[in-house]
Image (cartoon, rainbow, N blue to C red):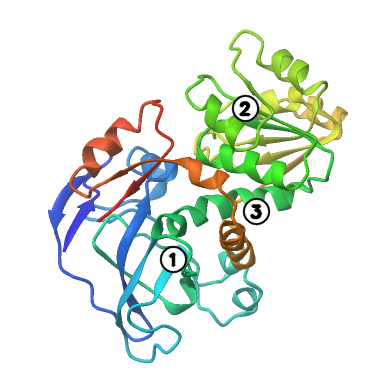
Amino acid sequence: MKAVTFQALHTPLEFENIPDPTPGEGELVVKVGRCGICGSDLHMTEDAAYGCKHGDVLGHEFAGEVVALGKGVTEQKVGDLVSVIPLKSCGHCEYCRKGAVQWCTNFGLQGGGYAEYAVTKPNQCVPLPSDLSLADGAIIEPLAVALHGINLSGMKTGDKVLVLGAGPIGLAVAFWARRYGAAKVAVQDISTYQEQRALDMGADLFVVDPEDPVGSAEEGLGGKADIVFECVGIPGLIAQAVDQVKPAGTILLLGLCTKPDTFNSFAMLSKEVRLVTSAFFTVPEYEATLRALEDGAEAPRLLVTDTISLSDTPDVFESLKHRTEQCKVLIAP
């Protein structure tokens, strides 16, 4: 099959032919219909902390058609359209039964979406309703990540929300915050590339002010934020969020930062700020995201700005390492 593979850190991906996958016992093969390029994929090719190896096939935001079943698989049948939850787990332990699969002792991350076919397991496959597209199935994962952050933040109806970062996760947070009743939603970034998209997805205002980011956001919100969502993952933004959140407010970390960061804990303590981290999502949140799309939510589809072929993926992938007007790019193998 055709696939795009990891070669080495700081090296472009490569489009090549690799062996077709064969499902083992309790596994199935999905013909990938759409796969999103995630910001974490970009980081994986630049940072040794992610542990990528030569020949790895990236891509964890994908949906497709079941084309082969391994021994013992009865939950799906050939021809089913599914969105794949990229969180590997045993499927049987207490955490798996609750849908909190990220705490399973057999937890791992599913890749493989940058290829024509990918192997996965039945408990990771969520059926796609007939009125949802494969593109819809591929954007469920980032939307579920954002929903998990919203739920952990304790956001209430009437809260003022500030989102730092206008990437797909930040924009998805703005969507959910508006849907769940935030009184005002501000998205703050260092460029205006995603300004209109942010407004169309639920933000009331978009803030770009390198000279006074704290003051500009506060003026736009009409006060400090009840909750600040840090959706970038670079050193310094926790400290900035401490300045931007109200006393007894919450900072919710969604940005993946693999570098050491420092902040003034006294400033945080003196305001009794609650710092919460968020990773992954639960299966019920994944399913809730699917239902939101099925119920007619159109704003999340605005995340998708382009659909490309596998052969174009290495070049487009490299271009996404620099700020552009692209948001969520989907691969159509």
Residue ID at (55%, 42%): 169
Q: Judging from the image, what secondary structure is the residue with disc 3 in? A: helix
Q: In x, y percent, where is residue 73?
A: 39, 88
Name the residue type under label 1: Val
> Dot 2, how many residues are within 10 Å of its Cα: few (below 14), some (14-19), or many (20+)?
some
Task: Name the quadrant of the C terminus.
Answer: bottom left
Residue drawn at point x = 60 percent, y = 63 percent = 291
Nearest to viewer (mark 1 / mark 2): 1
| Residue highlighted by disc 1 | 84
Front-most of 237 and 326?
Answer: 326
Instruction: Give, as a three-letter code, the residue at label 2.
Output: Leu
Residue 137: horizontal and vertical position, in percent?
Answer: 45, 60
Label 1: few (<14), some (14–19) or many (≥20) C-alpha neighbours in 10 Å: many
Residue marked by disc 3 = 148
- The residue located at (20%, 56%) in the rendering is 3
Mark 1 or 2, nearer chain start: 1
Quarter holding residue 321 = top left
Disc marking residue 237: 2
Residue 221, image x and y in percent? Answer: 77, 23
